[in-house]
Amino acid sequence: MTTQPKHIALPVRVEPKVSFANERTFLSWLHFTVILGSLAIGLLNFGNKVGLISAAMFSFVVMAVMIYALYTYLCRATSIKYGSRDPYDDRLGPTLICIALIIAIVVNFVLRFMES
């Protein structure tokens, strides 16, 4: 009869700087959304029909980035709180955000050139 080795659960110590880095990243994403939202408001106030369409597209991207930032922050904060060893990086989110921004910019330029 063989005995199974005992596993001792040791608490994972997480440095406080990890939580602060998570908060800084969240605030950085929100800073980006404020700048992009200002662009959308400028297009909305000082544009014509094309500006209205572009403002709507940029506003959609801004809302998506805000939701993404909050979701990422909460997932990372939960992982930090419970000492999970999961990686904290995300490769899909920023890529999709860049693609959405490129689409919004291209549509803006196409509509501007078709208008004139």
Image (spheres, rainbow, N blue to C red):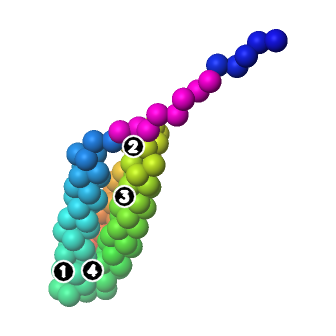
- The vertical placement of 31 against 82, above or below, is below
Q: Amino acid at mark 2?
A: Tyr
Indicate the position of residue 111 as horizontal and vertical percent values. Answer: 33, 72
Mark 3 vs 1, N-terminal side: 1
Disc 2 designates what residue? 88
Q: Which label was assigned to residue 42?
A: 1
Indicate the position of residue 76 as horizontal and vertical percent values. Answer: 40, 52
Q: Which label was assigned to residue 73?
A: 3
Disc 4 designates what residue? 51
- The vertical placement of 53 against 18, above or below, is below
Cβ–Cβ under 8 Å for marks 4 and 1: no
For the C terminus, the image quarter is bottom left
Secondary structure under badge 4? helix
Secondary structure under badge 3? helix
Secondary structure under badge 1? helix
Instruction: Nearest to the eye among marks 4 and 2: give it.
Output: 2
